[in-house]
Amino acid sequence: MKTEPIPLDSIAEPAPGGPDIDVAVNCSLWNDALPDAAALAREAAEAALRTAPADAASSALEVSIVLADDAFVQNLNRDYRGRDEPTNVLSFPATSEGTSPPDMPVLLGDIIVAYETTSAEAARDGKAMGDHLCHLIVHGMLHLLGFDHQAATDADAMETLEIDVLAALHIANPYEAGVNKDDPNP
């Protein structure tokens, strides 16, 4: 699904009480290297959710984030994408049709981030690990919201939105000249 970027200053705030963002850290390396990894992931997801169209932002939303290791992500990547290799982030939009009952949140989907790949990319590109984690979460959330980067124009629009969301989090443009572009392969 192709979605047009929405100016950040015209975006509705999420539903009262905020979205339900569950962050599970199933790899201790995350906590060892970045003790606030779960909080950073939640904050980045909330920032990306502010890009949702007003009708989606006014709904109660639910997202699951897993901070995992490369082996976990490699298994998912092999089983669901046919690529037997780790990648930095995977996003799995919810596929349920229809609407949720009025008192239930709308399930957007799952985001899984691999520690070793993310750490190696951050070191290679001279980025703070927390900033790179936030970028990958924002990237994954935009996929859950319907953005993609298959066509060049869609990729440019998604990249611009990522930059805007990260700027709102006081994170530098990860695509700036002289910095290697990430290949999130979501």
Image (cartoon, rainbow, N blue to C red):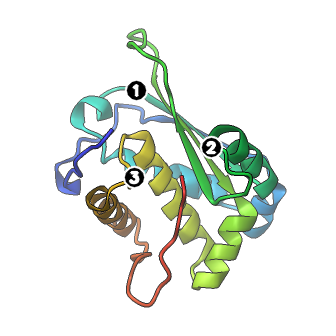
* Amino acid on which disc 2 is placed: Arg
Residue 133 image position (x, y, % from top left): 58, 63
| Residue 87 image point, x, y percent | 65, 58
The x and y percentages for residue 152 are 31, 62
Classed neighbour count for the residue bearing mark 2: other residues with Cα under 10 Å, few (<14), some (14–19), many (≥20): few
**Relative to the observer, which residue lies in front, 17 or 4?**
4
The image's mark for residue 81 is 2
3 or 1: tag closer to the N-terminus: 3
Q: Residues within 10 Å of mark 3 (few under 14, many from 20)?
A: many
Picture quarter with the N terminus: top left
Q: Which residue is mark 1?
A: 60
Residue contact at pointers 3 and 2, CB within 8 angstroms:
no
Q: Would you place residue 103 above or below residue 136 in this image?
A: above
Residue positioned 66% across, 66% down in the render: 118
Residue 146: quarter of image: top left
Left or right of 14: which side holds 40? right
Task: Check disc 3 and give the amino acid type.
Answer: Ala
Q: Secondary structure at mark 2?
A: helix
Q: Amino acid at mark 1?
A: Ala
Q: Tell me if 53 is positioned left or right of 88 in this view.
A: left
The residue identified by callout 3 is: 47
Of labels 3 and 2, earlier in sequence is 3
How packed mark 1 is, by other alpha carbons closer than 10 Å (few <14, some 14-19, many 20 or more), is: many
Q: Nearer the viewer, residue 152 or 112?
A: 152
Distance (Cα) linking label 2 and label 1: 29 Å
Q: Are marks 2 and 1 in contact (CB under 8 Å)?
A: no
Q: Give the side of residue 145 with respect to residue 140, left or right.
A: left
Q: Residue at x 35, y 67 (%)?
A: 163
- Mark 1 secondary-structure assignment: loop
